[in-house]
Amino acid sequence: DNLKLLMTYGFCPTDKNKEAVAFFDVQDLLEACARARPRYFPIPVLDQLHGSLMKLGQERQLYRFDGNTQKPRSCLQNSIQMMNEIVTTQLLPQNNIKDDPNFSSDLLQSLLDARKEEIRTILNSRMKNTINDNDEEWIPMIQSIKNLLEIELSYLKSEQNSNTDDDKICETS
């Protein structure tokens, strides 16, 4: 994978990553829930869910989105399903709501949108202000990181990932 090459050897190929994977962590997942449904996920609920996930040993879990298929991989699918079950069994009844059929797709879209925004922020501000004139030896590394971020952004930008059908999101890979 290009990131491993970059971190190990200080360079990576500039062609597309064959895996085309975007990664999300527990914090990303919970923040996406709050963005997708702020009414269901106030701070106390997020704190409780975070604590529960930590107890389950999920603090280092990475959830993957496959840029080639434009679908979440099984670990992300399972997490979206878990969050949907929590919404259905716990949070909808507390909010006197019967059904929320778009939650899963809205959650996925929130994850993708947040990552795209994070990449844009890095590319537009941090990458421009990273290198001083005296640090020219870092230019190849910074350029490689920039290339990786641009590649990731390109497969996250695909119009195909705006699924609205929860069955497509919850398919197993």
Image (spheres, rainbow, N blue to C red):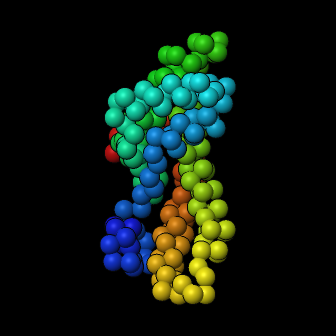
Percent across and percent down for residue 46 are 55, 29
Q: Is residue 139 above or below residue 69?
A: below
Q: Is residue 154 above or below residue 101?
A: below
Identify which residue is drawn at 38% across, 73% down: 6
Say if residue 147 shows up in the picture.
no
Quarter of the image for residue 13 reads bottom left
Say if residue 25 shows up in the picture.
yes
Identify which residue is drawn at 34% across, 30% down: 56
Percent across and percent down for residue 155 are 51, 62
Q: Quadrant of the N terminus?
A: bottom left
Identify which residue is drawn at 51% across, 41% down: 27
Identify which residue is drawn at 58% across, 61% down: 119
Percent across and percent down for residue 89 are 49, 16
Q: Is residue 6 above or below residue 63?
A: below
Image-based side of 3 in relation to 115, left or right: left
Percent across and percent down for residue 139 are 52, 83
Question: Toward the viewer: 24 or 104?
Answer: 24
Quarter of the image for residue 74 reads top left
Number of numbered discs on residues: 0
Q: Quadrant of the C terminus?
A: top left
Quarter of the image for residue 11 reads bottom left
